[in-house]
Image (spheres, helix red, strand yellow):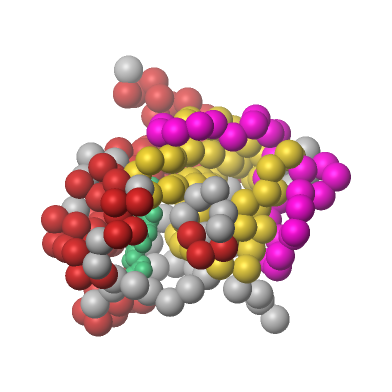
Amino acid sequence: MTSLIHSFVGGTTGKWRVERVSTLTGPALPPVQRLAIFDGDHPAPPADGVWLLRGVTSYERYVHRAERSALVARQPDLGRPNATCAALIPIKKSVVWWELTQDERRMIFEERSHHITIGLRYLPAIARRLYHSHDLGEPFDFLTWFEYAPADAEVFEELVGTLRQTEEWTYVEREIDIRLVVEDSLARQCEDAIDLSSHSLR
Ligand code: HEM
């Protein structure tokens, strides 16, 4: 059975190799070479782990019925064989955000920042899963996880860049963008795509 809680261990083992890390806001995490994801709880980092972040899958807080239908119709599953690039983006929002009411947060999240409307444009290229950490007393409120093919690396840059310009992001007080590749021959293509997209941004 799949557990609700998942443990993300940064260290020296795991399927995902860390390609690059950008600390956008707030303190950094110690550098690691690899990421392992465990279905279930890990009370402390294993011997080969440097940091441990935990989150639970949970019910949706903001999504309206029509939005859910659009998401369900378009969102791909995780674990597609060609999705050899991934991003783990842990995010913490401010006390001011958490003191808002549910209605006020929805207003900022969708009516004014268009998070779902923007995100939908990137489906099915990007597969995603949201883990909640706020109520676990973790250092981050959310662990956001994304998987995509090397050919969509540039598209993903556009998505994160667009969301970071929104009003919602003014409430983000810690964000670290960890990019990963599956360590096999396909991963090479992902690195090449990242190189190409960074060249084209210059
Ligand atoms: C692939 C396109 C994306 C789609 C379709 C999407 C969709 C969604 C949806 C539907 C929710 C609301 C869940 C709920 O009702 O509780 C959500 C929440 C969230 N998403 Fe996205 N998203 C996308 C990309 C991203 C990206 C790239 C980031 C980070 C850079 C991100 C960060 C978050 C965070 C932090 C939340 C939680 C917000 C909160 O509860 O305060 N999303 N997303």
Residue 105: name its quadrant: bottom left
Front position in the image: 151 or 40: 40
The x, y position of residue 44, in whole percent, is 76, 53
Q: Is residue 187 magenta?
A: no
Which residue is at a point 44% across and 40% down the rendered structure image?
Answer: 175
Give the farthest residue toward the top.
202
The x, y position of residue 150, in whole percent, is 49, 42
Which residue is at a point 52% across and 70% down the rendered structure image?
Answer: 57
Ligand 1 in which quarter: bottom left
Q: Is residue 178 visible?
A: yes
Q: How many marks?
A: 0
Which residues are the magenta region?
Answer: 24-49
Front position in the image: 66 or 58: 58
Q: Is residue 82 visible?
A: no
Say whether residue 152 is left or right of residue 12: left
Which residue is at a point 68% across and 49% down the rendered structure image?
Answer: 52
Specify the quadrant that holds the C terminus.
top left
